[in-house]
Image (tube, rainbow, N blue to C red):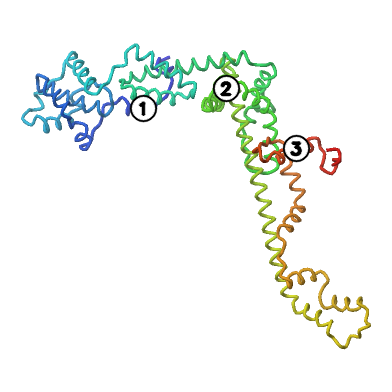
Amino acid sequence: MNVNSRRLSILTKSEIDDLYGLPRFSDDDRCLFFDLSAVEQKAVDAVYTHSSAVHLILQIGYFKAKQQFFVYGREAVLDDLHYILQRYFPDQALDKIKTLSKPTRLEQQQIILQLFDYRLCDGEAKAALEQKSQRVAMLSTQPIYILRETLQYLTNQHLIAPGYTYLQDMVSRVVTGERRRITGLLEKAMTPDVDKKLEALLESEEGMYRISLLKHEPKDFSYRELRQEVDRRKFFQPLYEFGQSFLGTAGLSNESIKYYASLVSFYSVYKLRRMAESTTRLYLLCFAFHRFRQINDNLIEALICLIGQYEKQAKLAADEAMQQAINEAGANLQAAGQVLELFIDNSIPDETPFAAIKQKAFDLLNIESFPVVSGFMRNIEFDKTAFEWTYYGTLRHKFKLNLRHLFCNLDFVCLVADEPLLEAILFLQELLRQGKTPRQVRIASN
């Protein structure tokens, strides 16, 4: 197997070229990067030959662009050489510019290092670099994150970045070292119950691996989908509670947890079973911890969404009922006026029983319309809130079906000022989990 194929893949070919490839300057780039400061011009003037001066200007411009040194062929830099000659040495011909010897090239690199206050990344600097990367790995074990932080550290310290393969190997060592640290702690903290639960994730169930079923995301907020999501939450909860304690104690960051969790989706079950058991357990624990949070978020979003839908339905129904009441009251005003005329109708004897008067009134205006019309005439506003609560009563079966199982399986917290509310929520949750209703509770005993 090719050695390179075993190296950690971090950057694409294009990204590697951006870091280490020979600069490709446009005309504007050449004006910018080959423009010499007074100090740089003095360094160029101090060299003995035109060839050395041209190559020093070339390397200074390249260093400004990428903080790297380059070994290049003449053909690869012809356009840049033409520009430098035209700007600084118009009397010199290109064929007179010779390739530098290795000693001269290394000598010029030292000049550039002094000009820009940079250092080569020697053995001591590499040791410090790896220690820095180890600290970064405790924040996130994503290789790309470690590499980027490493490159930023090199820039801040004015150090020339080592070759890409060196950085690949270093990041690989750091990632492996951090994983070993965590797996070592996990082996000590692992309980038989947690170990059995993690092993169950890789078991086959009705032709499918359980972990594949547990990766499933709900398609919608239907009862069936949310019921399955609640069951997944129950499965993961013991692992989440263990992970919450262990992962925090082990110093694993959220980013590292997400990275290890993502590897469970990246690798097949076949591959996971053939890894070191401690590594597989770590990946599965992080997956369970992260997946539990995702499920929790899904259930909270569903609860909020469904309650919002029911509230919207109740408000819409209340608006429609209010408009209907106004329309009915307006339509019955004429009949209401006829009812009032009964009290001044001289054809009705004074000794007529009030029951007979009521019957005449009901003949003119339907009895169900009296409260609406009288309220309208007295300018009493329609009680939308009362209607909304009445409407909620018609939704009680939907509440029981769609909201109760979500309410019972979520954990609630609140501000100190809302402690009575939280106490009521916890009491109601416990009641419903026991299969009881509030009507079955004796108020005097609580």
- Left or right for 372, reference 35: right
Residue 173 sits in quarter:
top left
Q: Earlier in the sequence, mark 2 or mark 1?
A: 1
Viewer can see residue 79 = no
Location of residue 182 with respect to 311 vertically, above or below: above
Residue topped by disc 3: 429
Residue 271 sits in quarter:
top right
Report if the CB atoms under discs 3 and 1 are less than 8 Å apart.
no
Residue 105 sits in quarter:
top left
Q: Which residue is the extreme one toward the top?
A: 123
Location of residue 139 with respect to 300 vertically, above or below: above
Residue at 72%, 56% (x, y): give it.
388
The spot of residue 294 in percent (x, y) is 60, 34
Residue topped by disc 1: 13
Quarter holding the C terminus? Answer: top right
CA gap, disc 3 to disc 2? 33 Å
